[in-house]
Amino acid sequence: HKHLIDIAEYSDTDIMTLLETAKAFSEVNRRAIKKVPTLKGKTVVNMFNEPSTRTRSSFELAEKRLSADSLNCGGSSTSTVKGESLIDTVMTLDAYQIDMIIVRDKHAGAPYIITQHSPASVIDAGDGKHGHPTQALLDLYTIWQHRGRIEGLRVGIVGDIGHSRVCGSLIPALKIMGAEVTVVGPGTLMPACPDVLGVDHVNLNLDDVLPDLDVVYMLRIQKERLEGAPFPSLREYHGLYGLTRARERLMRPDALIAHPGPINRGVEFDSHMADHPVRSVILDQVYAGICVRMAALFLLLGGAENGLDS
Ligand code: CP
């Protein structure tokens, strides 16, 4: 693959190769000297036109650990505030003979548009309500590391399904890998036709589904994307869909709690569950982010030709 935008273009074998590569990079990340020269001479542009903590920092660290040259050029620090278009910005950066553009943008489809105007490889780091493929891959990696498999696991995704770009990549990724996927949330936060999601079950009642789940994947309420939609208050939401200490008794003893971050404590869950020492894998997901992003850079930029430690 040249790009990582639409996870549905990746087969189960492609995804497993990426997860195995991420596991090898996990070993690199635990060494005293974490750097390998694999992508020396490659130039990667981080174009974050929307805020990010996890995705931006882990991509930047991944590039440094693979010895690529990183260029951070996005958002309000660029000449887009003077009216320069995304396409002109990309053509300008291409003049430097760059190899890859990693883009986060509020407009769904922005990564695809860049591929139409640039010879560089493109990774979607989150586009509008559309997709977030490296998030899906790090979620798969975390589940795989904790449970030893993905196939056959029952994964529930809870919350603001309709506004979630995480769902846009995570649902197809879980289905490609053979998981059983349930989405749970208020009807006001579901897509108009949930059938298009391609999930196994849609349910409006969290308490009905919790006892069956191996992984409870909580989503953040996307307040910035609600656009005045009818919506339960945050207090009502917490009562109906919050993963609370009281609800833990409904969960399987080995069920995991995952969340892409950033988290809203007191909304999608209480701190007891967010910080649960056994069930919560949220910080493991953050660590997986650097391993998976190193793997994506390595595989897309041809690092395999040089070997992992070259
Ligand atoms: N999960 C995620 O994309 O987090 P950031 O917005 O902090 O990158």
Image: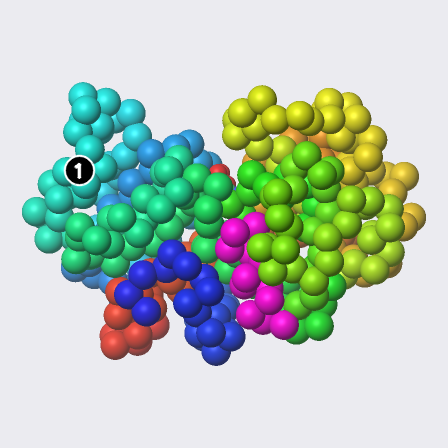
Q: Which picture quadrant has residue 78?
A: top left
Q: Position of residue 215 (x, y in %)?
A: 72, 57
Q: Position of residue 3 (x, y in %)?
A: 31, 61
Q: Which picture quadrant has residue 127?
A: top left
Does residue 46 sit above or below 116 in this rendering? Answer: above
| Quadrant location, the C terminus | bottom left
Residue under pointer 1:
89
The stretch in magenta equals: 167-178
| Quadrant location, the N terminus | bottom left
Q: Is mark 1 within 8 Å of ligand 1?
A: no
Q: Which picture quadrant has residue 174?
A: bottom right
- Residue farthest toward the left in the current orientation of the protein: 95
Q: Position of residue 225 (x, y in %)?
A: 52, 30
Nearer-the-camera pick, 74 or 254: 74
- Which residue shows up at 55% across the image and 70% down it? 176
Q: How many marks on residues?
A: 1
